[in-house]
Structure formats: structure tokens, C-alpha cells
Image (spheres, grey):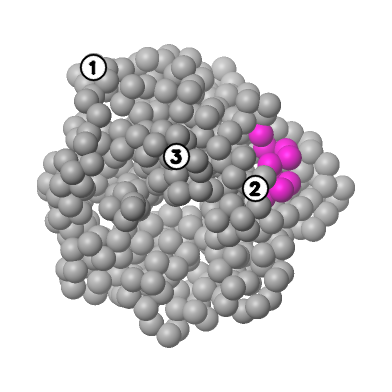
Amino acid sequence: MKQFFRIAINTVMICSMAWSLATAQTSKSHPKRAALLKNINQNFKDAGKQYKVLMSNLPQDKFPKTYFPKTGKYEFSGSDWWCSGFYPGSLLYIYQQTKDAELLKENNRILGVLEKEKFNTTTHDLGFMMYCSFGNAKDIAPKPEYKDILIQSAKSLATRFNPTVGCIKSWDSKKGDFLVIIDNMMNLELLFWATKVTGDSTYYKIAVTHANTTMKNHFRPDYSSYHVINYNATTGGVQQKKTAQGYADESAWARGQAWGLYGYAVMYRETKNPIYLEQAKNIAKFILTHPNMPADKVPYWDFNAPNIPTALRDASAASVMASALLELSGYVDKNLKKDYIKNAEAMIYSLSNAPYKAAIGTNGGFLIEHCVGHIPQNTEVDVPLTYADYYFLEAMKRYKELK
């Protein structure tokens, strides 16, 4: 962890003092609903313009990954990268709000590139890849073939389930290890959908078993989450509890907490089992009452980063949290509902303004700035990320749909 500490400190040192001051823990006025809705509608219009910039720079068979503002260079990926579903998913969310046919045309093109991943059994991320894309497409701009594509995707994902461990394997590693990351909670929605449309309860049972095992082993008494659990592939016993992208094994990596919050909100939606609602509420309490949560509700990349308050923020974590809180607000009593919506509003408001929202024509066409991918590996640090955009758009969509 000393190496992680050095990298974290060195990364922060390269950031400008101006940005640090701009994102200091100073409270912004709480937005009123009418004003925030007006802001959101403008954000969707701006998103359409931004994504046309992104489209114009995207190679035919590639997917956007990130952009480096200091050099003006992009980083792209193939369809097998875990983030490949966020670009078409974002296009669909923007199209739904703006009805810009050019965005739908691009979505249809890139889905054709992505489709082959329905057979990919080497990744746990088919929920991200296929349900954020084809899953949204079946609702927003449906085609008959999307059903079969998603069913095959669920079949591929299910091959990674180990009944002895009780989890879907995340990363392949050395023999005997069985690595599961908290992020994997985000891929279960695809399995629930598959049971609904096929009548095969296998997918449902896998999702529930994975969530129960994760709830048992991934969480600490304060409902913060470890990033990685290493199970024994033969016995199912826990061998290690550690981090990969966080500051330290026992720290609370911000985006990991967001994945858990979102994942258990979905679990309650799909099962109506109150244990998942309680889990989601407890995770939300950890996040929202943490003394290191900044006033603008855009968290530091790790709640235990050693150099708070100058530590980098992770706008992608705020995007995921905002979307999750808005869903969770529909399942709780009026007091919690008010609290969750208020916090989600603050997150959306912050992300809708500088320094997080990019100016039109900048940021390579991405919407959101200042995200953190993987500080320990010094990759995707203080850059835009596709999933920050996706969950920001989803959060705004959900806010517009609030009763």
C-alpha cells in the first residue's frame, strides 16, 4: 500500500491549484426543482452537441474510453472492453430526450459492432456491456432481434457462476483463486430480465445467490465495502479481502460504494426482498453521513484518501450515486425519500456546473470532467470516463420522471 500512497500523492501534485480551489468544500445553494429541471433540459441539449464531437472522432470499429485534455488525445477500446455499452447507452438516453435522429443512427451502427460480445464468456461485465446498450435499446428504440441478443448475453454471463463459491467470477487469475469485485453487482439486472422473458429461473437464482454471498463477505460492519474478495475456487472459503482500485485494502473506494448502493437498489426492485432494501439504505447512510463527503456531494476518489481535502474527486462516483439514490427514493418512507432526493439533486447540480460539466466543444466530446479510474495503476486519472456520462444522463432522466 505504500506504493499506492506514493502514486496517489504524486497524482494529486500534478493537478492545478485552481481546480483544487474550485472544488473546495464550499456549499452551493440547493437547487429548486424547476430551476434544476431547466438545467437538466439544457444538459441534454448540450449532450447532443458533445456526442456529435465524440462521434466525429471515433474510429469505425472502436468505442470511446477516455480523453486526455492536456494532450488532446483520445483512448479508444474494442467491443470487448467493459465500458463498451456506455457509449450506445448514452446515445439512447440523449436521443430519448432530444429526438435527434443522428444520434439514433449512430447508436444503431455501434450496436452492430457490439453485438458479437453476446458470446463473450471471458468477462463478468456483460451487464454493463449489453444491458446498458441493448437493454436500453429494447425500450427506447426496439428491434425484434434485441431479445435474442440479450438472452444469449445472459447465457454467457451465467457460465461464470460457481455454485460452490456462490458468485459469478469477476477476473480470471491464477488457479485456485476466484476473484469477485463489488462492481459485479451491476451486472445482475441482465439476469433478472432473462428470467422474466424466458421463464427460466436459473438466471434469477444466480443473481440472488451472488447478491447474498456478496452481502455476507464484501461488507464491513459500517456497510462500507471491500473492492475485491478472493475466494477459494474449490471450497468457497474467503482467502483475501483487498482492493485493486482503492487507496488501501481497508479503505472505502468511492465508486465501489456507489456500485454497491446501485446494485442493492436493483436487487430490491427485482425481488422485493426487504433484506436488500435494508442493505441499500445502510450503504446510503454510510455514503451520505461520511465526514469526508464534500459539501458539493462529489466524493473524493476514496473516502480514506490520505491527502483529503486536496485529494482528487471522482465525478463518476457521484453520477452513479445520484442515479441510485433516485431509484432508492421510490422504495422508502417520506423522510428518507426527501433526504435521498435532496442529495441526488445536489450531485446533479454540481455535475451540471463547472468544474465538472465540460464546455461545449471541449473535453473530447465527453460531458463530465474530473473522474478517477485507477490511481494505483496511474491510469485514467482526472479524465472523462464513459460511465460518468452514462449514469449522469440516467440520473437526470430519473429526476425528470420523479412524481
The amino acid at mark 1 is Leu
Q: Would residue 357 be found to the left or right of residue 332 on screen?
A: left
Question: Is residue 374 at least partly visible in the picture?
Answer: no
Q: Give the range drawn in magenta.
A: 211-219
Nearer-N-terminus badge (2/3): 2
Q: Do the residues labelled 1 and 3 touch (CB within 8 Å)?
A: no
SS label for mark 2: helix
- Give the percent coordinates (x, y) of residue 381: 37, 34
In the rendered image, the vertical position of residue 301 relative to residue 389, given as above or below: above
Q: In which quarter of the image is residue 294?
A: top left
Relative placement, left or right, of 126 versus 360 is right
Q: Which of marks 1 and 3 is in front?
A: 3
| Label 1 – label 2 distance at C-alpha | 42 Å
Judging by the rendered image, the residue that carries numbered circle 3 is: 334
Quarter of the view holding residue 95: bottom left
Q: Which of 12 and 38 is in front in this view?
A: 38
Q: How far apart are marks 1 and 3 (CA)?
A: 36 Å
Q: Determine which of the numbered discs, if any, sits on residue 392 in the image.
A: none
Q: Give the residue number, with chain letter if any, for mark 2.
A: 274
